Image (tube, helix red, strand yellow):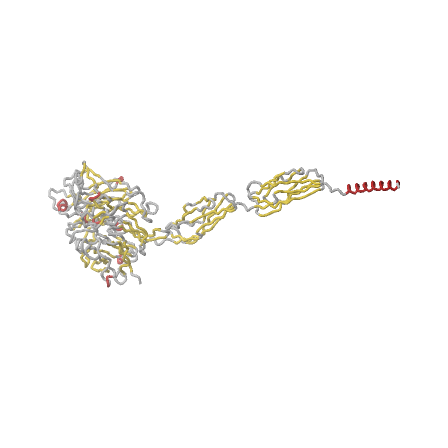
C-alpha cells in the first residue's frame, strides 16, 4: 500500500513537470504593430504640411526600436522626415506636403516599420487637391465695330479655381491697325470683372480678325479669343457744314453736292421727305457733320437750335432724334421778345452755332443762348456742347462787358453791356481758336450800341471787347443773321448797322472818337489782338444812319481773288444794306471816308452799284462761277457777273419770282466739276404766308427748276415762313428752318 502511494506521488510529480514543459514551449514571440493617424488626408498644393502620427505598439514583451520608411509618394508630394526610428509606444510625426506643381489625385502612401526580422506596414490614403488656378472669360466673344465708332463695354473676368486668390494681368493682342483698346491692359481681382472699350478710327480698314485676351498670374496663363469685325467708314466725301453759309468767306457755296442736279430737281422726282419736329422756331441755320459716332453707331448728323433754347441732333438720313439739350438754367425760360417782332415770340438760340470737330473728346458745338430767370433778369451764355451727347463741356460763360465811352448806358466813363437790351443774332465765327460774337438790339428800342466780343474756345473765357459806337446811341452787329467773315490772312470783316460816325478823323484817317456807325470794317488779329485795321464809310453815312438806311442790315461776302484786264489781282469784299446800293470794296484798301470838304460821292470805295437793288437788303449774297447772286426785300433774285474784277452794272438774269419780306439769302450747290449741275436755292420765307422753296439754274435765273408749290395737294408744303432762314443743302438733302422745326427735302422714293 505504501509502495502504491509512493507510485502515485511520483506519477503526479512527473505529470506536473510534463505540463510545465509543454506550457513553456508554446509561448507567442515578441512583436509589434504599426499604425498611422489619420489614415486619410487631403493635401493642398502649396499649403502647410499635414502631420501624420506614426506609432509602433509592442506585444509579447517586444521592446526593440522600429525603423519606419515611407514609400509611394506621388510626384510633388514630400515627407519630412523620410524615415523614423520609433520606440514602441511613443508616437512620432511625419509631415506630408504637396508642392504647387503636385498633380491632383488620390494615392496610397505606405509606411513600413522594420525591426530585425519583423516588418509591418500602415497605409495613408492621401488625396492631392487640384492646384489653385483660374479661367478667363470675355464677353461678348464677338462684336462688330464701325470705323469711327465706340464698341461699348467688353467685360473680362478671371474666375478663381481651387481657392485661387492671386492678381491676374490681362494683355490684348491682335488689334488691327486703327483699332485701340482703352485701357490697353487690365489687372483683375479674381471673381470681379473689369472692362475695356475698343475704338476704331475713321481710317480703320474693314475686315475680321481675332483678338486674344491673355491673363497671367505667376506661372499660370490662360487666354480667351474675341472675333472682331470692323466695318469701314462711310464715304468721307460728304462735306461737313460747320458754320454759316459753308465757309468763313460766307460764299454760300457747297461745291461737293454729287446727288442733286438740274436733271433730278423737279416736282416729279424731288420734294419734301420729312419734318423734324422741335420745340420752337428755328432761326439759326442748321449745321451738318458726316460720320459721327453716337451710341456705338455712325451717323450723318444734323444739328439745329430753337428759340426755345434747345439744341437738337438728328440722324440726317432717317430723321431719328439722337439727343436734345436745353441751354436754360434752373428755373429759367427763354427770353420774351421785348415787344420786337424781329425775333419772336421768344428768344433762345438765334445765332447760327459753330462746330470744331477737333476740340474735346468727341468734338464741340459752340452755342450762344438767351434766357430769363425767375426774377426777370436776362442772361446770355456761351455754351460748349459735346457733339455726341449734347453734354456741357465745362461751365457756360455769362456774357458781360464794359468799354470806355459816354454813349448809351454809360456809367462812370464806361458803357455797360445790359443783357436786357441785346440779342446775339449774327452767326458765330470761329477763327484760330477764338470765337467771335456780335450783338444787336431789339428793334431800335432802348439804350444800346455796338458790341463785338471774343472768347477762347478752349476755356470759354472772354478775351477781348470792342464797342464800335461807344459814344452815342444805336449801332449794332445785325447782318440779318449772317456771320462775321474772315480771310486767309485772318482778318475779320463786319458791317455795322446805324449809330454815330465821327466825321472828324485822326491823322490816320480813322474816326477820332472811335465811333464807326454804318461802316464796313476790317479787323486785324495780328499778335492775337483784335484791332480796327481799315474801314469804309459812305459819304452820307451819318445821314443814312439817321434815316435807318444802315449798311449792316445785310451780310458781307469775301470774293475769291479777281483779276483785272491788266493782270492785277484784287481781294474784294461785297456788302449791301438799306440804301439799295451794292458796295464792292478792296480788302487791302477799303477806302475809309471821303475827306472832301463837301463829299458828294463814294469814290473812295472800289466800286459802287447805285440802286442795284429794288428793295432794302435784309440778306446775304452767294457766289458761284464768277457771279454774285443778290436779292432784296420784295424783289427778284438777281445774278451779277464779275468781269475784269468789276461787277456788271446790271444783272445777267433774274428770277421770275418776286420774293416777299425779307428777301432770300441764296445757297448754291454743284458737284465740283460740272457747272451744269449747279443749282441756286432760295426761300420765300415771309412770315405772313406759307414758305416756298425755289431752285433755279445759275446760268439763267429765269429757268426755275422746282418750287415747293408745284406738286398737287400741297405735297411739299412746310408751313409758314421763318424770317431770315437760309436753306442748307448737303448730301442730297435740303434742310429748311421753320416755326416748328426743320423741313427736309430730297429725291423722292421710287
Instruction: Name, please, the residue furthest toward the front.
Output: 1
- Which corner quadrant holds the N terminus? top right
Q: Quadrant of residue 66?
A: top right
Instruction: Name, please, the residue furthest toward the left.
Output: 598
Q: Is residue 178 visible?
A: no
In the rendered view, does 716 fall on the left or right side of 85? left
- Which corner quadrant holds the C terminus? bottom left
Q: Nearer the viewer, residue 253 or 12?
A: 12
- Residue 729 placed where, x, y %? 27, 55
- Residue 60 placed where, x, y %? 71, 40
In the rendered view, does 150 fall on the left or right side of 24? left
In the rendered view, does 220 fall on the left or right side of 282? right
Considering only vertical position in the picture, is 345 above or below 713?
above
Instruction: Name, please, the residue furthest toward the top.
Output: 412
- Residue 278 placed where, x, y %? 27, 53
Q: Is residue 301 visible?
A: yes
- Residue 657 placed where, x, y %? 19, 58
Instruction: Say which residue appears at 48% left-offset and 43% top-offset.
Output: 167
Instruction: Say which residue appears at 56% left-offset and 42% top-offset.
Output: 99
Q: Nearer the viewer, residue 117 or 748?
A: 117
Amino acid at each position: 500500500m505504501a509502495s502504491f502511494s509512493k507510485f502515485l506521488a511520483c506519477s503526479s510529480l512527473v505529470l506536473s513537470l510534463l505540463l510545465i514543459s509543454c506550457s513553456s514551449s508554446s509561448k507567442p514571440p515578441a512583436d509589434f504593430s504599426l499604425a498611422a493617424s489619420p489614415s486619410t488626408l487631403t493635401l493642398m498644393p502649396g499649403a502647410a504640411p499635414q502631420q501624420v502620427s506614426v506609432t509602433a505598439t509592442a506585444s509579447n514583451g517586444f521592446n526593440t526600436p522600429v525603423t519606419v520608411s515611407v514609400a509611394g509618394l506621388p510626384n510633388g508630394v514630400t515627407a519630412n522626415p523620410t524615415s523614423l526610428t520609433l520606440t514602441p509606444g511613443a508616437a512620432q510625426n511625419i509631415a506630408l506636403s504637396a508642392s504647387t506643381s503636385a498633380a491632383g489625385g488620390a494615392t496610397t502612401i505606405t509606411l513600413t516599420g522594420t525591426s530585425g526580422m519583423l516588418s509591418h506596414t500602415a497605409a495613408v490614403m492621401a488625396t492631392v487637391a487640384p492646384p489653385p488656378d483660374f479661367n478667363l472669360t470675355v464677353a461678348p466673344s464677338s462684336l462688330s465695330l464701325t470705323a469711327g465708332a465706340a464698341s461699348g463695354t467688353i467685360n473680362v473676368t478671371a474666375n478663381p479655381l481651387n481657392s485661387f486668390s492671386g492678381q491676374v494681368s490681362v494683355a490684348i493682342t491682335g488689334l488691327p491697325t486703327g483699332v485701340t483698346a482703352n485701357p490697353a491692359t487690365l489687372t483683375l481681382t479674381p471673381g470681379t470683372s473689369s472692362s475695356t472699350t475698343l475704338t476704331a478710327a475713321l481710317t480703320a480698314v474693314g475686315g475680321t480678325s481675332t483678338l486674344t485676351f491673355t491673363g497671367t498670374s505667376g506661372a499660370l496663363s490662360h487666354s480667351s479669343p474675341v472675333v472682331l469685325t470692323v466695318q469701314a467708314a462711310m464715304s468721307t466725301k460728304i462735306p461737313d457744314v460747320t458754320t454759316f453759309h459753308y465757309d468763313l468767306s460766307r460764299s454760300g457755296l457747297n461745291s461737293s453736292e454729287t446727288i442733286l442736279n438740274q436733271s433730278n430737281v423737279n416736282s416729279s422726282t424731288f420734294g419734301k421727305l420729312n419734318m423734324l419736329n422741335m420745340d420752337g422756331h428755328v432761326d439759326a441755320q442748321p449745321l451738318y457733320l458726316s460720320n459721327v459716332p453716337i451710341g456705338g453707331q455712325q451717323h450723318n448728323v444734323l444739328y439745329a437750335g430753337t428759340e426755345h433754347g434747345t439744341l437738337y441732333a438728328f440722324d440726317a438720313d432717317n430723321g431719328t432724334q439722337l439727343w436734345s439739350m436745353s441751354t436754360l438754367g434752373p428755373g429759367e425760360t427763354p427770353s420774351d421778345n421785348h415787344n420786337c417782332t424781329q425775333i419772336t415770340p421768344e428768344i433762345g438760340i438765334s445765332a447760327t452755332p459753330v462746330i470744331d470737330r477737333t476740340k474735346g473728346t468727341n468734338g464741340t458745338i459752340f452755342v450762344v443762348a438767351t434766357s430769363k430767370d425767375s426774377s426777370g433778369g436776362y442772361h446770355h451764355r456761351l455754351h460748349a456742347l459735346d457733339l455726341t451727347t449734347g453734354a456741357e463741356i465745362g461751365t457756360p460763360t455769362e456774357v458781360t462787358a464794359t468799354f470806355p465811352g459816354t454813349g448809351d448806358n454809360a456809367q462812370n466813363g464806361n458803357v455797360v453791356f445790359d443783357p436786357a437790351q441785346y440779342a446775339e443774332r449774327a452767326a458765330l465765327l470761329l477763327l484760330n481758336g477764338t470765337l467771335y460774337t456780335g450783338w444787336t438790339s431789339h428793334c431800335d428800342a432802348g439804350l444800346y450800341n455796338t458790341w463785338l466780343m471774343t472768347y477762347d474756345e478752349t476755356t470759354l473765357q472772354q478775351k477781348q471787347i470792342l464797342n464800335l459806337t461807344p459814344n452815342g446811341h444805336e449801332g449794332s452787329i445785325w447782318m440779318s443773321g449772317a456771320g462775321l467773315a474772315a480771310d486767309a490772312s485772318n482778318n475779320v470783316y463786319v458791317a455795322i448797322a446805324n449809330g454815330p460816325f465821327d466825321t472828324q478823323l485822326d491823322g490816320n484817317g480813322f474816326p477820332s472818337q472811335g465811333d464807326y456807325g454804318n461802316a464796313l470794317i476790317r479787323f486785324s488779329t495780328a499778335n492775337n489782338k483784335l484791332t480796327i485795321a481799315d474801314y469804309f464809310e459812305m459819304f452820307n453815312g451819318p445821314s443814312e444812319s439817321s434815316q435807318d438806311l444802315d449798311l449792316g442790315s445785310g451780310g458781307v461776302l469775301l470774293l475769291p481773288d479777281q483779276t483785272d484786264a491788266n493782270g492785277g489781282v484784287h481781294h474784294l469784299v461785297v456788302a449791301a444794306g438799306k440804301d439799295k446800293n451794292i458796295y464792292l470794296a478792296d480788302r487791302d484798301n477799303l477806302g475809309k471816308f471821303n475827306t472832301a470838304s463837301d463829299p458828294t460821292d463814294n469814290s473812295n470805295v472800289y466800286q459802287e452799284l447805285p440802286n442795284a437793288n429794288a428793295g432794302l437788303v435784309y440778306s446775304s449774297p452767294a457766289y458761284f462761277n464768277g457771279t454774285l447772286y443778290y436779292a432784296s426785300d420784295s424783289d427778284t433774285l438777281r445774278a451779277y457777273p464779275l468781269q475784269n474784277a468789276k461787277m456788271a452794272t446790271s444783272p445777267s438774269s433774274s428770277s421770275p419770282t418776286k420774293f416777299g419780306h425779307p428777301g432770300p439769302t441764296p445757297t448754291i450747290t454743284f458737284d465740283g466739276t460740272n457747272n451744269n449741275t449747279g443749282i441756286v436755292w432760295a426761300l420765300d420765307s415771309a412770315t405772313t404766308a406759307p414758305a416756298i422753296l425755289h431752285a433755279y439754274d445759275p446760268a439763267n435765273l429765269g429757268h426755275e427748276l422746282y418750287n415747293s408749290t408745284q406738286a398737287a395737294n400741297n405735297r411739299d408744303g412746310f408751313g409758314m415762313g421763318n424770317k431770315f432762314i437760309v436753306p442748307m443743302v448737303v448730301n442730297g438733302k435740303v434742310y429748311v428752318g421753320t416755326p416748328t422745326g426743320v423741313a427736309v427735302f430730297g429725291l423722292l422714293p421710287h
